[in-house]
Image (cartoon, grey):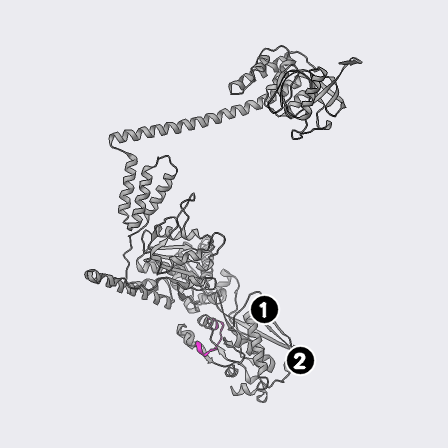
């Protein structure tokens, strides 16, 4: 040591430490393993010295620290003893001598040698210091009682307080704090401040120890409770076994009895007994036991042999279907046919039972009973399913398939998955409680698919009459007979249903309702339903027939009656408000009152044009919401032979426009047009309501008519609606959606409908009063329609084209 100017100047080798520090007046064993640290020990041996300066690193992760990576405040320590290990490391016992602060480093290679000066702590022994020491001592005793481990030597030094300074250094060594906090305690020069910080750290440690003890106590109690319950349960089992009252045995016997009562097929019963044997051999604490119980419950609860005694009364069925739904004649006929077939089958089965030798002949082909109701929203597809179930006297089950993307929703999950369940079909059968319910699969056209599989593919087996007698659900792992289930599916469109699935379905189209049908539906069903729904009585609200017709015509425009029902509901709400506010007993609603209740008219009454126009024809269209009319507008202007198509037309409709132009250009001479008429003009075809996408070939006649009208300057009759696909040679081809289109024409005020000759057969489905109001013209070629579509009176006879006049 060099003493200069009254201050101790200490020059000693430095040992960087990662996480441990030896405070003055304390001893601790440190492991020296880094190259520089080992070189320091070699240096001490060479210099016959035993003192080193211990400095903490600022970051523990640095393996080869520089001088700037070390704290300046450290401890001068004496190497009391050292032992070299097998791997070259040295375990050294060090005793802290005094606190020092490094001023500068004299050498950095091969070892750190630093010049430091001693730092003296301010140690005032007063009552506050004594109180702090007492609090820390009591806190340490409490920590030991809570399980804190303290080295015996440190404990002796702490309990036998020689001096407050030595006490604080020993406490700093036993606190469970981070290296950074320990360095912080070393750098505090005031004894009271250090004791206060140590007390703060100790209190935090005590909180953690108390929480740990609380959690340990809770865990111990829970474990002891579990052990106790297991012991008592086992004891109870042995006692019950001695008394002949085995509860677990009773449970197994109950399951065995339930399996017998379920009347399962032999294969399924065999599987259930096998699972029951597994359960009987399992410990009650085995988690798999609950999975087996759930599986057995599913097998037992399924109606393997339970059937509803179907009612095959044709008259009663007709009455129920007519009560619940107006119109839908074709659909009702199909249901009545099905009931008739089932009645004959039942009678035949009774005869065969009396003749055992003919039993084998009873296994005849059964016609498919899987119907698919296809039609626009709101026409009664789903509600008709309930009526069918009521007519047959069967349970009704409905599941919605819209948006399903997981195959497991149909087939179920494997039992290996936690929380596994059967698919929706088996769940529906269990819910029904019989094996022959009316099962409705709603919105089958809206099934999706992704990486979890294709649900529509999983439906193929369930909806195939040749296969569904042994439907396989992944959860059950045994076949279930679905052949007695009357499946009904619903869809708005057929395009999105996969062909393989569509092939298994019997398609029944639901057309849109006519105005008269809607009126009857309101009178028979909707009005009374909404009156009751709004807590009104029939005598309180009266709506005139003219008002109902006006609501149908001026406030709604749809194929079904859903929006119509909403308008009736709005009417009832307003009526209820007036009854409450004005204390009225009765309210009568006429046409004049509708604007007060429902606001201004939403749609114009007359949808066709006000007068005959050149270049504008009226086409008939089919949409998902039913039939509609659309106007084809054609404008001719000077140009260079361009054809412009607008109105969000699809590819097929664009091709119809090109075909129409080619047909006219090929027959320029008979239309009194110049040979090169198209070279000096541009033709623009537009279909209004440009925000609505339009496609399909059935507007071919209307497009050709509008285009020819614009070219020959002859107006098109406004009260003529037309539909049909055309070829380049002018042939008119058959189209679909005839009923919907004709009803739309009738609703729009059209008087004459032109359609392909091959569609004449489709008029059978159209109500007679609609047919009375319309004149139909059936054509095979475009040359035959001009007299019907063009207003020839509007131009001089000499300007009428020969083909038009001759047609």
Q: Is residue 432 above or below residue 24?
A: below
Q: Quadrant of residue 135?
A: top right
Query: Which label is found at residue 680?
Result: 2
Compared across the picture, whether 407 is left or right of 680 comes to left
Compared across the picture, whether 150 is left or right of 760 comes to right
Spot occupied by residue 288 in the image (x, y as percentages of width and height): 38, 39
Residue 753, visible in the rendered structure: no
Q: Quadrant of residue 290?
A: top left
Gap between marks 1 and 2, in whole Å?
24 Å
Residue furthest right in the image = 5
Spot occupied by residue 535 in the image (x, y as percentages of width and height): 41, 54
Q: Which residue occupies the foreground of this view, 222 or 787? A: 222
SS type, badge 2: helix
- Judge the density around disc 2: few (<14), some (14-19), many (≥20) Cα neighbours within 10 Å: few
Residue where numbered disc 1 is placed: 647
Residue 631, visible in the rendered structure: yes
Q: Which residue occupies the foreground of this view, 368 or 673? A: 368
Q: Which residue occupies the foreground of this view, 593 or 615? A: 615
Q: Is residue 492 above or below residue 257?
A: below
Spot occupied by residue 446 in the image (x, y as percentages of width and height): 47, 58
Which label lies toward us, 1 or 2?
2
Q: Quadrant of the N terminus?
A: top right
Q: Please tell me which residue is depicted at 58% across the width and 24% down the height of the picture.
A: 204
Q: Please tell me which residue is depicted at 21% across the width and 60% down the height of the picture.
A: 353
Highlighted magenta segment, given as a residue range:
743-759
- Judge the density around disc 1: few (<14), some (14-19), many (≥20) Cα neighbours within 10 Å: some
Tell me if residue 653 is in the magenta stretch. no
Q: Which residue occupies the foreground of this view, 716 or 680? A: 680
SS type, badge 1: loop
């Amino acid at each position: 040591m060099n003493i200069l100017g009254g201050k101790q100047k200490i020059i000693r080798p430095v040992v960087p430490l990662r996480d441990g520090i030896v405070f003055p007046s304390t001893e601790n064993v440190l492991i020296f393993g880094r190259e520089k640290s080992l070189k320091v020990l070699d240096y001490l041996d060479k210099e016959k010295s035993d003192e080193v300066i211990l400095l903490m690193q600022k970051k523990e992760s640095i393996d080869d620290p520089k001088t700037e990576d070390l704290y300046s405040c450290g401890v001068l320590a004496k190497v009391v003893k050292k032992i070299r290990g097998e791997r070259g490391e040295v375990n050294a016992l060090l005793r802290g001598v005094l606190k020092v602060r490094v001023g500068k480093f004299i050498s950095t290679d091969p070892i750190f040698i630093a010049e430091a000066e001693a730092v003296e702590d301010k140690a005032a022994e007063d009552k506050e210091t004594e109180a702090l020491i007492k609090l820390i001592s009591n806190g340490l005793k409490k920590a030991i009682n809570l399980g804190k481990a303290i080295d015996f030597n440190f404990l002796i030094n702490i309990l036998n307080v020689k001096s407050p300074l030595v006490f604080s250094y020993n406490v700093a060594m036993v606190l469970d704090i981070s290296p950074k906090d320990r360095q912080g305690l070393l750098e505090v020069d005031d004894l009271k401040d250090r004791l206060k910080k140590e007390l703060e750290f100790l209190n935090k440690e005590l909180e953690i120890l108390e929480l740990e003890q609380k959690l340990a106590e809770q865990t111990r109690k829970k474990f002891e409770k579990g052990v106790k319950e297991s012991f008592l349960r086992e004891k109870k089992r042995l006692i019950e076994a001695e008394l002949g009252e085995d509860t677990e045995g009773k449970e197994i016997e109950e399951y065995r009895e339930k399996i017998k009562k379920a009347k399962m097929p032999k294969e399924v019963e065999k599987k259930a007994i096998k699972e029951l044997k597994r359960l009987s051999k399992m410990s009650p604490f085995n988690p798999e036991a609950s999975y087996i119980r759930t599986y057995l419950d599913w097998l037992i609860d399924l109606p393997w042999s339970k059937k509803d005694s179907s009612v095959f009364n044709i008259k009663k069925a007709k009455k129920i279907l007519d009560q619940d739904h107006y119109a839908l004649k074709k659909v009702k006929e199909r249901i009545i046919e099905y009931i008739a077939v089932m009645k004959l089958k039942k009678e035949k089965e009774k005869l065969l039972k009396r003749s055992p030798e003919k039993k084998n002949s009873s296994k005849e082909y059964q016609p498919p009973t899987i119907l698919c109701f296809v039609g626009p929203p709101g026409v009664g597809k789903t509600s008709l399913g309930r009526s069918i179930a009521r007519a047959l006297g069967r349970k009704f089950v409905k599941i919605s398939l819209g948006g399903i993307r997981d195959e497991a929703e149909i087939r179920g999950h494997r039992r290996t998955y936690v929380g596994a369940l059967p698919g929706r079909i088996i769940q529906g059968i269990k819910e029904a409680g019989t094996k022959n319910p009316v099962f409705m699969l709603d919105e089958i056209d809206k099934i999706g698919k992704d990486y979890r599989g294709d649900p529509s593919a999983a439906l193929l087996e369930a909806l195939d009459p040749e296969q569904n007698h042994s439907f396989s659900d992944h959860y059950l792992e045994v076949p279930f007979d679905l052949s007695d289930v009357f499946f009904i599916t619903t869809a708005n469109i057929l395009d999105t249903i996969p062909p393989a699935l569509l092939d298994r379905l019997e398609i029944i189209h639901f057309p849109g309702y006519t105005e008269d049908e809607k009126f009857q539906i309101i009178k028979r069903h909707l009005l009374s339903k909404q009156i009751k729904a709004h807590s009104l009585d029939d005598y309180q609200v009266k709506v005139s027939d003219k008002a109902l017709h006006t609501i149908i015509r001026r406030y709604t425009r749809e194929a079904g009656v859903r929006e119509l029902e909403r308008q009736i509901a709005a009417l009832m709400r307003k009526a209820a408000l007036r009854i409450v506010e004005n204390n009225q007993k009765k309210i009568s609603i006429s046409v004049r009152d509708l604007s007060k209740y429902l606001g201004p008219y939403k749609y114009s009454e007359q949808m066709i044009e006000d007068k005959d126009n050149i270049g504008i024809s009226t086409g008939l269209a089919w949409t998902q919401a039913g039939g509609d009319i659309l106007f084809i507008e054609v404008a001719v202007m000077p140009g260079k032979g361009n054809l412009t198509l607008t109105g969000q037309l699809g590819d097929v409709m664009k091709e119809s426009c090109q075909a129409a132009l080619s047909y006219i250009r090929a027959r320029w001479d008979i239309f009194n047009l110049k040979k090169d008429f198209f070279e000096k003009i541009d033709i623009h075809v537009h279909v209004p309501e440009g925000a609505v996408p339009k496609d399909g070939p059935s507007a071919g006649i209307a497009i050709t008519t509008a285009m020819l009208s614009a070219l020959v300057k002859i107006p098109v009759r406004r009260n003529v609606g037309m539909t049909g696909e055309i070829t380049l040679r002018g042939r008119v081809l058959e189209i679909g959606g005839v009923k919907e289109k004709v009803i739309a024409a009738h609703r729009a005020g059209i008087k004459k409908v032109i359609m392909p000759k091959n569609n004449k057969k489709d008029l059978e489905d159209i109500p007679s009063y609609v047919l009375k109001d319309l004149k139909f013209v059936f054509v095979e070629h475009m040359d035959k329609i001009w007299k019907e579509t063009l207003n020839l009176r509007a131009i001089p006879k000499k300007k009428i084209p020969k083909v038009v006049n001759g047609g």
